[in-house]
Amino acid sequence: MNSLGQSIIELLLLGFLLTAVVGLVASWIVRKVSAKVQYRVGPPFMQPFYDVIKLLGKEQTIPEEANGFVFCLAPLVALSSVILLSTMLLRIALQKEGYFAGDVIVVLYLLAMPSLALILGASASASPHASIGSAREMKLLISYELPLLLAFTIVLIKASGQIEQSQLLSLAALSGLKPIMSISGCLAFLVSILCIQAKLGLVPFDVAEAETELAGGVIIEYSGPLLAMWTLEHAMLLVALPVFVVELFLGGFDSIILGIIKYVVVVVLLILIKNTNPRMRIDQIMKFFWYYCSPILIIALVLAVVGNFLGIGWL
Amino acid sequence: MKISPKKPVLAIGPLHPLQEEMEFFQLTVDGEIVTDIDVRIGFNHRGIEGISETLQFDQVPYLISRICGICSASHPLAFVQAVEELAGVTVPDRARYVRTIINELERIHSHVLWVGLAGHFIGYDTVFMWAWKYREPILDILEKITGNRNNYGNVKVGGCREDIDDSMIPEILKELDEIEKKMDMLIKAVLDDPILQARLKGVGVLTYEDAIKYAVTGPTARGSGVPIDVRRDDVYAAYGELDWNVIVQPEGDVFAKAVVRLLETMEAIKITRQALKKLPGGPIAVEVKEIPPGEAMGHTEAPRGETFHYVRSDGGNRPVRHKVRAPSYVNVPSFKASCVGANISDATITLASVDPCYSCTERLAVVGRNDKVICDGKELLRLSRARTEQMKKQMGYKEGFKFE
């Protein structure tokens, strides 16, 4: 089989089908565990699947004043970038050797795409609720990108002593290391958990959707199949982002079972944060990421550099 | 609604996840900052006052306990107090205590309900579910006493309908102890949470002056340092004979209102316990034969503030005028003082902080330009008849025509 055909099969099977199924199961876990924490029964196992399937059969309305093209394009862009992202991440998780060299910079770009698409779609939907939501999503993006990049830089610095220079940007090479075993890496891990919490739009960072303020905010005007796409994209991010963190900080999927355990631990951390916090205000979120998370990571960065320089692994 | 690009309007309502009832807040926003607020009500007007004037004095409490599903003890109590004043009836001691117990249990469940909802409004669904779980035993006690979890239908002119069986009292006291423990835990968890404090402290401040100016009542006023409470200021039921405190917080923000409500639940448990222990013997109702002509008013401290009922009788068996003023009616306009200038996120929790109840507040007024009333009862009747004529015409109605 030629490499193009193989890539297409990988995109469809690995990036879309597997990620979507695992993502919907993960979103069921999020809902079920939240329900248990709150003394509720929670949804049945198949509920996230039913949700998506039912939405696909619903009527599609596009607001009269909306820019229809951008409005419809946004979920497609988001979904396709998540498919590409999860193909890369899962490919590395399942098989490190081979022709495929996932580049971390590409991953970081792809990570920003869903949020950008969300901003685009919300801005195109001609609703005051959605425009406030998109403004909030923009501010959210600005606030967590800096700590996320700093955390990533720390991983690179920790790795620079251990792997070849040419392999430095390859996620496959990076995923063999365990930066969490050091102080700076641990701090970076904790902050990136918060960053992906914000990327996933979970409480306390769900300001853009903010059901009781903006009634859905960014996705208020979406309905039917397009809303199903957003739901699916959100579920798939629930796979991609924790897997990214596992590969970057926790040593990746060295064996499948161990990898799945690491993944579940990260998801449980996200659920715990979700259920023990109220929604923060957008200005509080910006202050939190800029005034608290970033300085902590700058200190961690210094520690990592010093550790590298002196050859102390645990710094 | 037309949206001008210069003044974007964020519509909260008529149906919005923030409020479970129909209401319409138009927030004029500048970015995230609310610059003006307009409140519109009247989406679900049921004409309670009008219906009340067609019912007998004994039937009215049954109707007005349905004004609101939560204040279903305080509304009828205010009404029967007005009628009792009119008829010059002295209510038996036992009835006064039973009324106190039911009203205080209602206060506990209402305040706990608010705490849960407030948690939900700021995205803290765990508090929402936990608070409502702890509210269940209180509803169970109410069911045990009155037969209903809500809409107790337990007051009538001259006393109460259902008595508290003396054999139930130890059981209820035991359950109250359980509830007190859980409430204590919930209060500590909510008031000590640093993120909740960051989210609620200094938010939606209603100053003492504004509280006086807008004449707010209940926890909204007490949260702004205005020490008013009908239970103490114009003693009714058995409140004068029991030992309790009026909770007042001077800050005026949402957090202060939450503190007032949470601490009031503890006071309410205290009152209920004392009333159960002191419950005197004797009958629970006296017979009231006639309501003489005249007018009277009754008011009670509902969970949200002062509920006011005005009754006029012409000596017949129906009120000729029954006027209801629920607490939310005076609390809602205070948004003008507390929401303007706030962030949208803060404004929404401030809207919820007075625990607004729109079913109580509903009014119908059609007002034209220049504040001239263009629609009254006669006009409504004319419109209704015109509509019927129009429909007849459309359906080809003639003499002898039968609807298929």
Image (spheres, coloured by chain):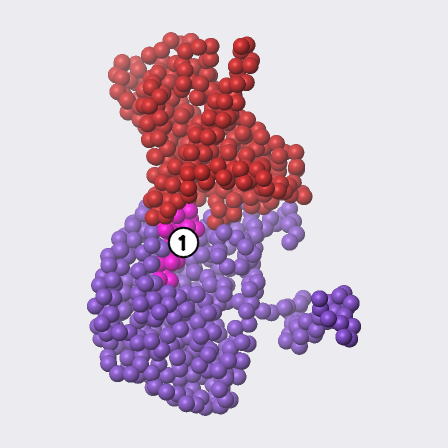
- Residue displayed at 63% across by 47% down: B6
Q: Is residue A305 left or right of residue A236?
A: left
Residue for badge 1: B118
- Residue displayed at 42% across by 43% down: A43
Colour red, chain: A
Residue B110 in the magenta stretch? The answer is yes
Looking at the picture, how far across and down is residue B159, in whole percent?
Answer: 35, 81
* Overall secondary structure of the magenta section: helix
- On the question of residue B299 being in view, the answer is no
Which is more toward the observer, A101 or B236? A101
The region drawn magenta spans B107-129
- Residue displayed at 55% across by 72% down: B47
Looking at the picture, how far across and down is residue B181, in whole percent?
Answer: 24, 57
Which image quarter is the C terminus of chain B in? bottom right
Q: Is residue A2 above or below residue A290?
A: above
Which is more toward the observer, B62 or A45? A45
For residue B256, what is the image quadrant?
bottom left
Colour purple, chain: B
Q: Amino acid at mark 1?
A: Ala
